[in-house]
Image: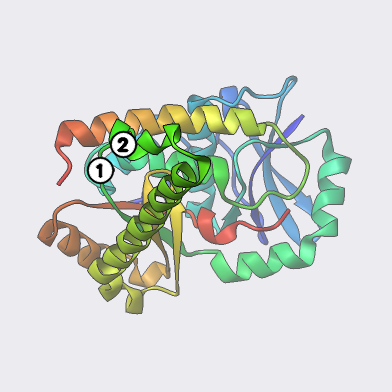
Amino acid sequence: VIHLYALADAPVAVAGLSGLDGAEVRDLHCGRLHAVVSDHDAVPAPTREHALDHAAVVEAVCALVDAVPVRFGVRHADEPALRAALDERAEALVDVLRRVGGRHELVLRATAAPEAKAPTPSTVAAADAPGRSYLEARLAEERARVTAARSARERLRSRTEELDDLAVEVLERDGPVGPERCLLVDDDRLEATLRLARRLIDAQDGLVLGGPWPPYTFAGGIG
Amino acid sequence: VSARLSRRPADREAVAQAVARHGARDQTTLVDLLDRVIDRGVVVSGDVVLGVAGVDLVHVQLRILLRGVDERKGVR
């Protein structure tokens, strides 16, 4: 099988790069695109180590050329299958490459909140009552959860929006530990953005800065 | 900052160290990177090795790991 790491529109000097399980990484020229791939006898297991190996190759490729990161875990049976998939979506992929290639992703989010406590008996006591009361209690809990999430997003925005002018694009989304703001940043503004971001997290408790990384979040959506 | 500047060959530990050094200055952003690698980026059809269950399992493990790190730091 072929494991796909990244796409570029110029040749990638991959000599010396090792991929998953130490496999040799190669540049496969497919029409307008260059695919960075490695070949495997069996499907690589979905492990944390393999995910980090994938990330390492993507980062190295993005250091060499403007490239689009590919999600970990996408495999193709053979070269013809990969070429067909790339041919079919070449135009959209080139568009993504032009939009995000050579740029970096940063993320700002709050530190993880403590686990919410399970509902106390008093809040679910209505379960013994007619169904309507029980459902109303659950509805109130859900509304409180939605309100808290909205408030967390707004709080994060107000604490970090000073960075927006330095970014090409800002995406607000729910990440693995809560709301996050993802910034797509030009290479020549990266250092200035990092300086300001670090100043913000030093001045405000409970903020986390992640990156710079290849622009995974901004490259998604092509299937 | 990243391999863009260091131009080193791909190295898993180098990426993990760069995350710790230049991210939140601790290991909490490793989960953010892994979330991106597993969940985001271009797909280009093909077969996705990670089934839904596989993705969830990895994420659950990462969330537990992250909570532990953040709680040890003290949630501020």
Disc 2 is attached to a residue of which chain?
B
- Helix, strand or loop at mark 1: helix
B62 left or right, relative to A68: left
Q: Quadrant of residue B28?
A: top left
Residue reaching furthest left?
A: A203
Q: Which residue does the image show at 45% across and 51% down from the upper left?
A: A139
Label 2: which residue?
A: B17
- The 10 Å Cα crowd at callout 2, few under 14, some 14 to 19, many 20 or more, is some
Give the residue type at disc 1. Arg
- The 10 Å Cα crowd at callout 1, few under 14, some 14 to 19, many 20 or more, is some
B29 vs A186, nearest the viewer: B29
A91 left or right, relative to A208: right
A30 vs A213, nearest the viewer: A213
Which numbered disc covers residue A218?
Answer: none
Residue reaching furthest bottom?
A: A165
Label 1: which residue?
A: B21
Relative to B8, say whether A41 is above or below.
above
Q: Which residue does the image show at 37% across and 71% down from the upper left?
A: A188
Whether residue A117 appears in this view of the structure is no
> In 3D space, how far apart are the residues under numbered discs 1 and 2 (Cα atoms)?
6 Å
